[in-house]
Amino acid sequence: MGLFDTYHQEILTYLKQKRREGAVTEFDYRGRTDWPISKNRNLVLAQDTAVELGDPKSASTSFLLWTNDYRSLRHNRITVVGPDLPDITTKQSSFGKIVIVGGEDFNQENSYERYRALELVRYDLHLKGYMMRGVSQYQREWSRISQKAIEDNFSFHTLGGALIDRFLELDFVRSVEVIFITAGRRDVLAMQSISDRVLRIMRAMNKMAEELSFDCDTCEYAEVCDDVAELRSMRQTLKKREATGHAQSQ
């Protein structure tokens, strides 16, 4: 089983229920987006804003999963749970964004490096009329879309397509799905429960890879590794590599 397969299944179960409720719109994205790029700092002022997604007063979650089983993903699929951007009637909206990446050869030795590459891409968007106002270490995301962009038909198809384009530029990525949630606070918080668990895995992986810390008795993420077999395998791989490197330096 992959590192995030359990959470992927929970997301699929959630989407299945929302489809039964008639709350889901899905697009198959084809080709590169032709939305204009803003090469300078893309500032969207409050008075020019049509909608704020995930502002501090609203619920917000944004996270990324990956899997080796890339053929199981619905490649280039953009799913919207709730109203699309032109149909949101409030100035502020609770917001969820989930990116699921399928790639080749994610393993114990390269997972951390590939995770870092994916994280950099996730926020590397410079679309005219779209401003990432704030991204936190707690996997929240706050963004603004300008009134002019909405008038020019900026939608989640545009935003999701731009994300897919960026991820597919990485040579190890084979398929991408993007899910946006605007159905309300309850729906976003349901996904935040998954996000919180994903974040614990990410932090445990960071601690192992950056600090080369393998003392489970003193580690605050010991229970995470106990529950996730892939993290235990990664720990053993990194521990052996560190021991080999230390021995060679003697």
Image (cartoon, rainbow, N blue to C red):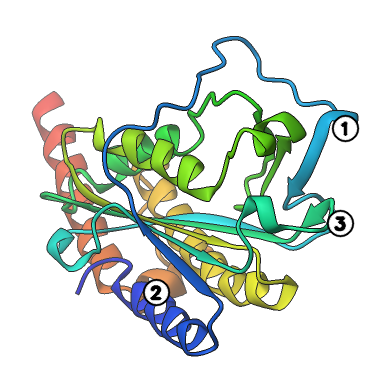
Q: Position of residue 117 (x, y in %)?
A: 34, 34
Left or right side of 19 for 62? right
- Which amino acid type corresponds to the residue marked 2 in the rendered image? Tyr
Q: Position of residue 96 (x, y in %)?
A: 60, 60
The mark that comes first in sequence, 1 or 3, is 1
Q: Which mark is residue 57?
A: 3
Camera-nearest residue between 4 and 148:
148
Label 2: few (<14), some or many (≥20) within 10 Å? some
Please determine whether, in this image, residue 52 is positioned above or below residue 132: below
Which residue is label 1 attached to?
Answer: 46
Q: Secondary structure at mark 3?
A: loop
Camera-nearest residue between 158 and 167:
158
The mark that comes first in sequence, 2 or 1, is 2
Q: Secondary structure at mark 1?
A: helix
Left or right side of 133 for 168? left
- The residue that appears at 62% across and 46% down in the rendered structure is 137
Camera-nearest residue between 188 and 29:
29
Label 3: few (<14), some or many (≥20) within 10 Å? few
> Real-space Cα distance between discs 2 and 1?
36 Å
Residue 65 at least partly seen: yes
> Real-space Cα distance between discs 3 and 2?
26 Å
- The residue that appears at 25% across and 30% down in the rendered structure is 169
